[in-house]
Image (spheres, rainbow, N blue to C red):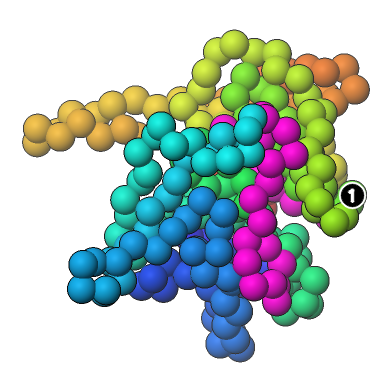
Amino acid sequence: MGSSYGWLITGDERSNLILVNPVTRAQIAMPPPETMNNVRLRYTEDGVLDGYDVLYMDLFSRDFDTEMEPYHLTLEEARFYLYARVVLSCDPSHGNCTVLVVQLPKDQLSYTRVGDTKWTWIDANPNCRAYQDILYNTNDGLFYGVRGRDQVDTINLNGPSAEVKVILKPIISYQAHSRYIVQAPWGDFFQIWRHDKYNKENGRKDRVADKFFVYKIDFVEQRSSKQITSKITQCSLVTTVHSCFQ
């Protein structure tokens, strides 16, 4: 599912999130999926564990949406729904590492810390959803999340409860297929928009990346300006899991 600070981010056959150091072979297990606020274990009539039921959460009422049918997931496929994005605040061997995930449905946020026994759902306001990408800024100790229409939030997990603040208001109505947020080594923030196209081969219709557009974020002026990628002195690498400058 990705890597960070030299650690691999993976999941086992029950979709437990595990951090693995390929050099030292150390492993750190995160709390199990059923400790997430909207996840329930599902059993067969014979009492055999069969999968997970993922409930819809209503951010306005901060309760379950009983009108929506839960996602019924197998044990193995749950990892692709519960960990759509995974970001670490630091090397997890340091002991003070925070792990933030974007989870389905509705691309909401949950977090935990190394050593915790459960995940905590972020319900700071009714708009804590639809996150397409997140990163951690070591300069200010905050997570940054990008949502639709160019909006960027900071997620402060340093206190007893999560604080979410809009730092770039929605300003663009055009929707890209995917948005990523990255921070360059010199401190500037960029949004990268991915536009896809559909290739039809052998009777199948596959969606593949077609174009990328880079926008420099100006939090003071509340705008994003399109950049010519050749003028960026470092290479931006975008995958479907993580965004990074290398």
Point out the stretch of residues depicted in magenta: 111-138
Magenta stretch: dominant secondary structure? loop
Mark 1 crowd level (few <14, some 14–19, many ≥20, 10 Å Cα): few
Q: Where is residue 62 in the image (x, y as percent from the top left)?
A: 63, 39
Horizontal side of 104 relative to 158 (left or right) equals left
Q: Where is residue 184 in the image (x, y as percent from the top left)?
A: 76, 43
18 vs 117, nearest the viewer: 117
Q: What element carries label 1?
A: loop
Q: In which quarter of the image is residue 92?
A: bottom right
Which residue is pictured at 56% across the width and 34% down the height?
Answer: 58
Q: Position of residue 13 (x, y in %)?
A: 36, 72
Q: In which quarter of the image is residue 114?
A: bottom right
Does residue 226 show up magenta in the picture? no
Whether 67 is drawn above or below 6: the answer is above
Which residue is pictured at 85% across the width and 56% down the height?
Answer: 160
Which residue is pictured at 87% across the width and 17% down the height?
Answer: 221
Horizontal side of 22 relative to 45 (left or right) equals right
121 vs 9, nearest the viewer: 121
Residue placed under numbered mark 1 in the picture: 140
